[in-house]
Amino acid sequence: AQTVTQSQPEMSVQEAETVTLSCTYDTSESDYYLFWYKQPPSRQMILVIRQEAYKQQNATENRFSVNFQKAAKSFSLKISDSQLGDAAMYFCALVGKIQGAQKLVFGQGTRLTINP
Amino acid sequence: KAGVTQTPRYLIKTRGQQVTLSCSPISGHRSVSWYQQTPGQGLQFLFEYFSETQRNKGNFPGRFSGRQFSNSRSEMNVSTLELGDSALYLCASSDGKQSTDTQYFGPGTRLTVL
């Protein structure tokens, strides 16, 4: 079974500062992908960043970057220069590379508040 | 490209009724997955359709069913609604060739069961 755990139900950060959201996971798959999705109050789930497990280099996307520690099964998201528009629920998700079996497993989410 | 669209955005039903939700994927995407989001259970996978065939299924009762049409549009049906079915139902589309293809989500349908 695959599981994803986000241990921080809520986080807050001052605008322009940096914040890191934690995620740990468990899977028996040797090849898998990890994702961070953002869900603002509008409820639309938006892809933030994705990481392929076989790649050692951490993915980055503008102000968003990940710290992927495969041995520790950890996949944290760092948001630099936080902006008010970053306020949202953030979900960590995992999908195993099983042929023809698209099924994202999500963590419980972290609610991020940006303080002006 | 237009994004994933879901209709209706909001629904109110009573217990025992049935409901049909619709999802139109991004043009060219052949896979549509459905997820249920509730405060208590979080985001849970319902099922995935690819080329009109159910390819994967989560742990939901048979009251939850779906289908996919030749144009890749998908519908989800819930029969004999229960109070616990109140949730945000999200659909996501992807290319579908690999299980790891990025899924792009629609805005969701908020279902309230009274």
Image: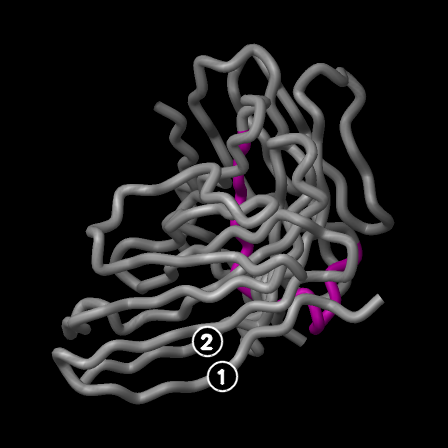
Q: Residue at x 70, y 73 (%)?
A: A84
Residue type, label 1: Pro
Q: Nearer the viewer, residue A1 or A40?
A: A1
Mark 1 in CB contact with mark 2 (< 8 angstroms):
yes
Question: In the picture provided, is B39 more to the left or to the right than B6?
Answer: left
Residue A40: x and y in percent read 58, 70
Question: In the figure, A112 relative to A115: above or below?
Answer: above
Instruction: Tell me the residue that label 2 is attached to.
Output: B109
Question: Would you say residue A40 is visible in this rendering?
Answer: no
Q: Residue at x 48, y 46 (%)?
A: B48
Instruction: Tell me the residue that label 1 is attached to.
Output: B8
Residues in magenta? A81-95
The question of residue B13 being in magenta is answered with no
* Mark 1 / mark 2, whichever is N-terminal: 1
| Quadrant into which the C terminus of chain B falls | bottom left
Question: In the figure, B72 relative to A87: above or below?
Answer: above
Residue A33: x and y in percent read 63, 29
SS label for mark 1 = loop
- The CA span between labels 1 and 2 is 6 Å
